Image (cartoon, rainbow, N blue to C red):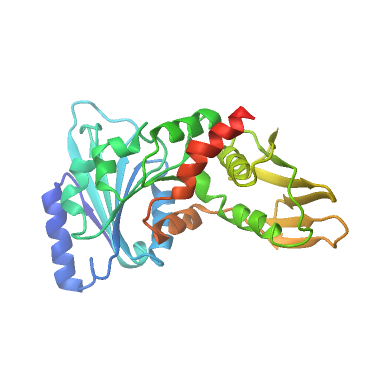
Amino acid sequence: MIIDLPSTSISAISKSLVKLREEGGAVALGRVLTLVISTNSENLESVIAAANDASREHPMRVIVISRPKNTQKDHHYLDAQIRLGGDAGASEVIILTPVGLDQSDDSDLVMGLLLPDAPVVAWWSGTSPQVPSGTLLGKLATRRITDALDKPDPEIAISELAASFRPGDTDFAWTRLTLWRTQLAAILDNPPFEPVLEVKVTANKRTPSAILLAAWLKLQLKVPVELISVEGGINDGVHKVEYVRTSGTTVLQRNAKGVADLIQPDQPNHSIWLPERTLRDSLAEELRTLEPDRMLETVLKDGLPALKAQ
């Protein structure tokens, strides 16, 4: 079900939600959080699709603020759309399109639509504020999600993330590494039980995830970590990680089909399922726990400087 509310107000949207709940009895029942997404018209449907998929694991109210690219300066109004049922996964989706309205902060638009007594998660898709926790929307949120991959320069993006980081901040550049970190840690739990002397990370030079992975490995293993840049189109950017040890080099290398080859000295090769993380996968993972990500904080504050200083 899709309900359009042209030239409306937050009060009118709230009344429509109440009416729909009275008529259908489902709206807002069993919701565990409010997800507020700030995006643009180009990304609108992709972020809604990811939120709809994630809502089947985390029933929630989704509020999307979609600012149009080009508007006439003398036009000031708010369009809205409410999506329910099959058009909204296991949630209800409220799309706000402010035209000619102040863009300094999105909190004024969502305050009257937040679920009572439920945590708020803010996700900036596309352009994100320099200090997410410093915005009014960021102060409302328990979790603040950005994506350094949206920035043109990965090194600057990660440096800005480290400089602005506050407990509750997270970034999809880090979330995309979960499967890599799991497999790389598991390798050390199996023979040969030798210390790692050096690590080499081969990755797409245009991705911030590779920098975070190298910083994490530096932090955990306390050995030299070399970041080797290549061309590639994988969203986390990581192609291969090598553990150099006395008996030889262990290699975890992913191919284009999402399968990684584990190559170890004097052992048969193994294939490991290591797919790219979709937007839905990353979002669902971030919503599973709303506790501060202490590991990401440590990687940014300790691992990143250690990587740069080596």
Write down the quadrant of residue 114 in the picture. bottom left
**Do we see residue 92 in this rendering?**
no
Front position in the image: 119 or 114: 119
Write down the quadrant of residue 184 in the picture. bottom right
Residue 284 in the image: x percent, y percent?
Answer: 44, 59
Q: Residue furthest top?
A: 73
Query: Which residue shows up at 23% across the image and 71% down it?
Result: 26
Task: Using residue 105 as the reference point, say whether residue 227 is left or right of it.
Answer: right
Image quadrant where one finds the C terminus: top right
> In the displayed structure, would residue 62 be above or below residue 231?
below
Query: Which residue shows up at 65% across the image and 46% down it?
Result: 221
Image quadrant where one finds the N terminus: bottom left
Query: Which residue shows up at 48% across the image and 54% down it?
Result: 282
Front position in the image: 292 or 196: 196
Task: Using residue 68 as the reference point, say whether residue 288 is left or right of it.
Answer: right
**Do we see residue 63 in this rendering?**
yes
Circle count: 0
> In the displayed structure, would residue 238 be above or below residue 289?
above
Residue 198 in the image: x percent, y percent?
Answer: 74, 41
Write down the quadrant of residue 57 in the picture. bottom left
Q: Residue furthest right?
A: 266
Front position in the image: 215 or 6: 215
Query: Which residue shows up at 17% across the image and 61% down it?
Result: 17
Residue 238 in the image: x percent, y percent?
Answer: 65, 44
Front position in the image: 50 or 133: 133
